Image (spheres, rainbow, N blue to C red):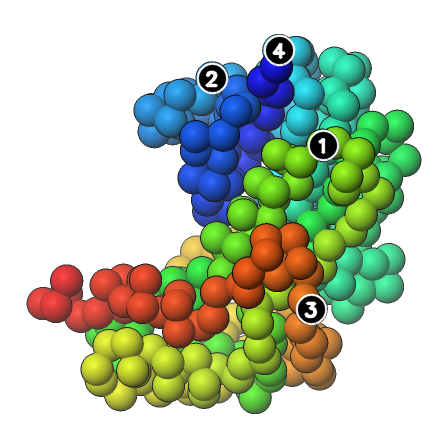
Amino acid sequence: MSRTVLITGATGSVSTALMNALEGADVDLRALVREDSKADGLRERSAEVFVGDLDDARSLPPAFEGVQDVWLLTPNGPRASENSMNAVWAARQAGVERIVRLSAIGAAHDAPNRSGRLHALSDRETERSGMRWTILRPHWFMQNLLNEAGDIAATGTFSLSMASARIGMIDVRDIAECAARVLLDDPDRHHGETYTLTGPRLLTFDEVADQLGLALGRSITYLPVSDDAKRRTLLGYGVPTWIVDMLEEYAQAYVSGWGHFTTDTVADLLGHPPRDIADFVRDHAAAFAPDDHR
């Protein structure tokens, strides 16, 4: 019998990739969205759409009723642990069997960033929920580079406050395929596991620039900047202060060597290596190309 999987954060990059990875599988997809206006693409994927908000616990029960598996992805923000709590409670009340939760790299009560500490609270609540659970903790997303695509296309440069940090960055599609593998396996197989997901190798942003240059056939340069300079840029784009603070904390941690590791977990789960940065930039080259080359 098909299992019903509820996808939270359904319009985000990881959940979208997860639905791609689940396409054709013997599951019934549900999608939780905050606004029905964003649901058309989800319905085209044959997902049953429910409108609800993780900020509002009273809006959630209909989406969780009759669900066996929940993909739990909460928005980054100061209410992240409350959002997760609301979802976990709705799942318990509805008799959900399993939660597969997207956490964050290095989530711990003593993590050097507020996001990691909030995720640790939600991880622990999930572990004590009485349901089967699996937690995924992915490294820095390669797709974060798409935030720099405008500058790269226009100037051939991009600026981050990462200095010469080396990071085991991962393609979101590999995160999604690992989540799909867990969701499609028997609920007991991955129960109680916390999987730290990384790409295949450590990379500096100079090396990322080199890979972008090879894919685009032009010189691309990484320009490290100070925390204050990056902060001014992000605030100037209207990024909320809490998010800017969080990104700064992550950058400082990465510069200190906090992200200087890789794991074999993706290959163990999927039976093949994760995508390399060369795969990512080749597949997304159009996003980084000047307008007249698109």
Quick one: label 4, few (<14), some, or many (20+) residues within 10 Å? some
Quick one: label 3, few (<14), some, or many (20+) residues within 10 Å? some
Residue 65 or residue 76, whichever sits in front: 65
Q: In the structure shown, which secondary structural element does the residue marked by tag 4 occupy?
A: helix
Tell me, for residue 62, which label it has, or none.
4
Q: Is residue 227 left or right of residue 83?
A: left
Quick one: label 1, few (<14), some, or many (20+) residues within 10 Å? few
Q: Earlier in the sequence, mark 3 or mark 2?
A: 2
Residue 123 or residue 117, whichever sits in front: 123
Type of amino acid at the residue the image marks with label 4? Pro
User: Picture coordinates of residue 135 (x, y %)?
Assistant: 74, 46
Residue 227 or residue 136, whichever sits in front: 136
Q: Nearer the viewer, mark 4 or mark 2?
A: 2
Q: Earlier in the sequence, mark 3 or mark 4?
A: 4
User: Picture coordinates of residue 267 (x, y %)?
Assistant: 61, 61
Residue 75 or residue 287, whichever sits in front: 287
Gap between marks 3 and 2 measured at Cα: 35 Å
| Disc 2 target residue | 48
Q: Are marks 4 and 2 in contact (CB under 8 Å)?
A: no
Residue at the (44%, 22%) spot, across then down? 47
